[in-house]
């Protein structure tokens, strides 16, 4: 039923419109139209919205009468300069013979009074015009404006771009930097000649990191500009390893208590660096509070909205801002602009109240008064020194100038295509056409800068890094100390001349702002519980781990062959341990080895000199000389265990040890058998000595030694010993040793030697009491007892000794057993030969 009623009403409305006379089809405006503050209408008009006044006077509406027009207060000289720059650019284009020849541009400039509502109202007026009555022909005329140069702040720009976007009317801003405006889905018709805050925020994060400031505080405007700017900065700062101690937000309209609260946060903060991402209007009251409480010693980092503000620089109370650094839009020179600005006069438009107000603010006079306080109109702007007349800093002014030229070049491209196309496309440009062509516009302004827009409507981000420094006359100046260019590779975008920077309180020393001091190499960072990652303790690296960078987050283990040095900042080759000839232990063992060889040689020569004596002949001189030779080899084989193990030395040391000792034991065994056979040969009818004569003795030595040789050959063939770096016993050093290859081969060699030793000991023990004036079996028993004791002790010591001590134990066992054989078997004979020659006779030997 409801749908039928709505359809009937719609049908009646259509019939009423069709049959009503055309003259009566009108709509009347129910309020007062929003009128531009400055305007000149020509063939093609450009709209503009500036915050020419700082505030709109608040009124309480009672809703019983028509509200009065909004009243704006506090003239903003900077914004007024922007408006005059737009007019200057339009007049310059109109006077040009190359750009839009034959076409006159007009303008309609509205004052938003820093009010979002007033901005949107101004935008609606620019779209619809200012007619009190709209007829059926109103929509067939050309649009009121073809493009809008928009606001200096982001929040009002967002409001206007949202309203205008669906109608495809291009909006181009000179100072709205919020990164959110790059969203083409939400703002399809938005462009800007200033860079997005996305790049500025990342540049500020890189700047802070460049100076080593990892602990900073932030204050921001509580609007789209500040919130989005700081959000992008925090994201980039996190990537750079920068931490934020506090982040506060403020608006100029906030109560005094809010400013005092932020002041306390700044005072209690431990950081010495504060980033102010604030609009100039919001920053001024905060600076006033800081000045009143005499807060100094803070290194300020600024955004482009205030870092080149002449108002702040000229205020003596804000001298604590000296040393501030921040990114600013590149400066420029616009020829003829100063002369144009100085020619502005109320007489140009006598009915324009804005020009009168500007004149009264500039010269502190009034047209409503007569006398000394009255304005005469003869005052000269050239005599003024204020933000309006100053053309030394045209950073943002140049962006207004560029925005007008972007529109003009776009219009020229549209009209050029109209002239070159067929007749069906001839006509007047529409905002939709301007929007389409503006996406591809590309031109170079008089300053030499090439202008074009990317897919998001943004230009290339280029910033000057400026530093607040005192000039010789005591005034504050903005010194360029670097630059940032987003078109360069990421590592080259930020360029800083740090030696030209003066820091807070006119210091040349770079301020330090960190939560924790840097951890030196050899330590790692350990994050303090409950605090940001920039707050940490420095923990020394563990043994075998290093960190070779400052502020390393972790220690890294060295490779297996390396170990950390004392400072734990680099890996060094582990100490390679082996028994060396140059160390004391190696030298001592070498000396004893050579002493053993020397004593053996002395005994050999002594025996050789007395080989015809009874005691030498009676004890089987041939086996004795062979035994002395084998003992010499035993002493010498110990030398193969000393020195750096190589492939050949590893094979030689074990096989030489096994073969020489078996040769030695075989000789001792032969001598023992000779003693036993000799005693049995004295019995009647015994023919034993014929069965164990010299030939049999030689063959027994050769046969017993040959078995050991075969074992060694099999060992070397199947799995020979080889040099081996033992990394498991010690963490801090490498034991260079000989790996046995086949443990079975080693223990077979050692076991066979032990078997012969035990056999020799048993036989000698059995023959120890044979009736003989010189019973050699008794001395052989002692020697074998020492030999076996030494080697039985060697086995556990060998297994448990670490590193080079394993080799030392083995050498000691070789030398001890060799000396035991030498002393027990040959020293008693030498004693008789040298000191008791009377006993060295056959008669004495055969007495019993």
Image (cartoon, rainbow, N blue to C red):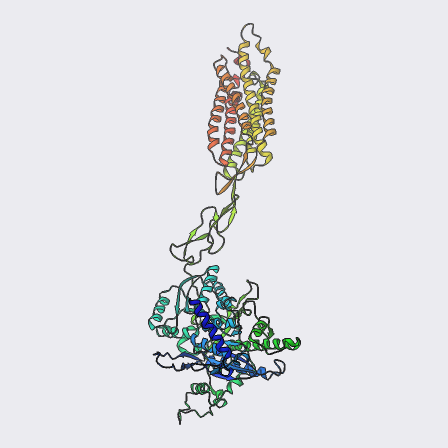
Can see residue 471?
no
The image position of residue 386, as x and y in percent, is: 46, 82
The image position of residue 617, as x and y in percent, is: 57, 17
Q: Is residue 62 above or below residue 182?
A: below
Where is residue 685, by image quadrant?
A: top right
How many discs mark residues in the rendered view?
0
Residue at screen point 57% across, 10% down: 688
Query: Furthest-left residue in view?
Result: 257
The image position of residue 694, as x and y in percent, is: 61, 15
- Quarter of the image with the N terminus is bottom left
Q: Is residue 546 above or below residue 219?
A: above
Query: Furthest-bottom residue in view?
Result: 371
* Residue closer to the observer: 320 or 722: 320
* Residue closer to the observer: 221 or 157: 157
* Residue closer to the observer: 413 or 556: 413
The image position of residue 305, as x and y in percent, is: 46, 73
* Residue closer to the observer: 291 or 259: 259
Query: Furthest-top residue in view?
Result: 685
Q: Is residue 690 above or below residue 417?
A: above
Residue at screen point 45% across, 64% down: 231
Can see residue 93?
yes
Name the side, left or right, on which 247 lies relative to 126.
Answer: left
Where is residue 146, by image quadrant?
A: bottom right
Q: Is residue 210 above or below residue 661?
A: below
């Amino acid at each position: 039923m409801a749908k039928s009623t709505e359809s009937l009403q719609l049908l009646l409305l259509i019939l009423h419109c069709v049959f009503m006379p055309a003259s009566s089809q009108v709509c009347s405006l129910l309020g007062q139209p929003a009128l531009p503050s400055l305007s000149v209408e020509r063939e093609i008009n450009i709209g503009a919205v500036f915050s020419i006044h700082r505030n709109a006077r608040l009124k309480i509406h009672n809703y019983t009468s028509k509200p009065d027009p909004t009243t704006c207060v506090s003239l903003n000289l900077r914004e007024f300069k922007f408006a005059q720059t737009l007019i200057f650019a339009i007049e310059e284009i109109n006077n040009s013979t190359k750009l839009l020849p034959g076409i006159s541009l007009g303008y309609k400039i509205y004052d938003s009074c820093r009010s979002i509502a007033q901005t949107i109202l101004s935008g609606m007026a620019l779209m619809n015009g200012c007619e009190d009555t709209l007829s059926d022909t109103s929509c067939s005329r050309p649009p009121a404006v073809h493009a809008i140069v928009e606001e200096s702040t982001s929040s009002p720009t967002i409001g206007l771009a949202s309203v205008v976007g669906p109608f495809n009317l291009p909006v181009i801003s000179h100072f709205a930097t919020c990164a959110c405006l790059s969203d083409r889905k939400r703002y399809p018709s938005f462009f800007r000649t200033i860079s997005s805050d996305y790049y500025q925020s990342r540049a500020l994060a890189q700047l802070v990191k460049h100076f080593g400031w990892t602990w900073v505080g932030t204050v921001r405007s509580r609007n789209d500009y500040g919130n989005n700017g700081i959000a992008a900065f925090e994201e980039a700062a996190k990537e750079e390893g920068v931490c934020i101690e506090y982040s506060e937000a403020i608006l100029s309209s906030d109560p005094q208590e809010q400013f005092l609260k932020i002041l306390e946060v700044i005072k209690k903060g431990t950081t010495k660096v504060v980033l102010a991402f604030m609009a100039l209007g919001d920053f001024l009251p905060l600076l006033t509070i800081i000045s009143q409480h005499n807060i100094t010693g803070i290194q300020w980092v600024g955004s482009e909205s205030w870092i080149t503000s002449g108002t702040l620089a000229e205020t003596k109370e804000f001298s604590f801002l000296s040393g501030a650094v921040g990114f600013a839009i590149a400066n420029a020179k616009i020829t003829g602009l100063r002369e144009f600005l100085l020619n502005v006069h109320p007489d140009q438009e006598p009915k324009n109240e804005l020009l009168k107000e500007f004149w009264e603010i500039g010269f502190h006079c009034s047209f409503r008064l007569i006398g000394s306080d009255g304005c005469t109109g003869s005052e000269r702007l050239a005599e003024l020194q204020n933000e309006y007349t100053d053309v030394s800093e045209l950073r943002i002014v140049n962006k207004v100038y560029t925005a007008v030229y972007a529109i003009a070049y776009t219009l020229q491209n549209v009209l050029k295509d109209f002239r070159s196309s067929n007749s069906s496309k001839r006509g007047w440009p529409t905002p939709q056409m301007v929007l389409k062509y503006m996406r591809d516009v590309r031109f170079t302004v008089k300053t030499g800068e090439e202008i074009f827009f990317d897919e998001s409507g943004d230009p290339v981000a280029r910033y000057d890094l400026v530093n607040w420094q005192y000039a010789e006359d005591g005034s504050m100046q903005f010194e360029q100390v670097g630059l940032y260019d987003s078109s360069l590779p990421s590592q080259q975008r930020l360029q800083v001349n740090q030696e030209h920077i003066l820091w807070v309180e006119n210091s040349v020393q770079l301020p330090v702002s960190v939560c924790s001091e840097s951890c030196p190499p050899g330590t790692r960072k350990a994050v303090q519980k409950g605090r940001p990652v920039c707050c940490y303790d420095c923990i020394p690296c563990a043994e075998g781990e290093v960190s070779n960078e400052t502020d390393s987050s972790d220690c890294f283990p060295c490779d297996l062959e390396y170990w950390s040095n004392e400072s734990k900042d680099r890996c060094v080759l582990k100490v390679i341990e082996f028994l060396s000839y140059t160390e004391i232990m190696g030298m001592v063992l070498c000396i004893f080895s050579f002493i053993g060889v020397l004593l053996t040689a002395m005994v050999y020569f002594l025996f050789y000199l007395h080989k015809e004596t009874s005691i030498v002949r009676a004890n089987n001189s041939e086996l004795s000389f062979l035994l002395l030779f084998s003992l010499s080899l035993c002493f010498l084989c110990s030398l193969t265990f000393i020195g750096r193990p190589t492939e050949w030395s590893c094979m030689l040391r074990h096989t030489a040890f096994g073969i020489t000792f078996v040769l030695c034991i075989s000789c001792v065994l032969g001598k023992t058998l000779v003693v036993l056979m000799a005693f049995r040969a004295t019995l009647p009818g015994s023919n034993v000595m014929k069965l164990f004569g010299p030939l049999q003795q030689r063959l027994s030595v050769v046969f017993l030694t040959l078995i050991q040789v075969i074992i060694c050959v099999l060992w070397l063939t199947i799995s020979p010993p080889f040099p081996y770096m033992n990394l498991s016993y010690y963490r801090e050093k490498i034991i260079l040793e000989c790996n046995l290859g086949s443990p079975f081969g080693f223990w077979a060699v050692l076991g066979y030697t032990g078997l012969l030793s035990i056999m020799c000991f048993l036989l000698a023990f059995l023959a120890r009491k044979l009736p003989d004036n010189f019973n050699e079996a008794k001395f052989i028993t002692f020697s074998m007892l020492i030999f076996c004791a030494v080697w039985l002790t060697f086995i556990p010591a060998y297994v448990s000794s670490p590193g080079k001590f394993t080799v030392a134990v083995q050498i000691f066992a070789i030398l001890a057993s060799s000396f035991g054989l030498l002393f027990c078997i040959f020293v008693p004979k030498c004693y008789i030969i040298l000191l008791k020659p009377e006993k060295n006779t056959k008669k004495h030997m055969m007495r019993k």
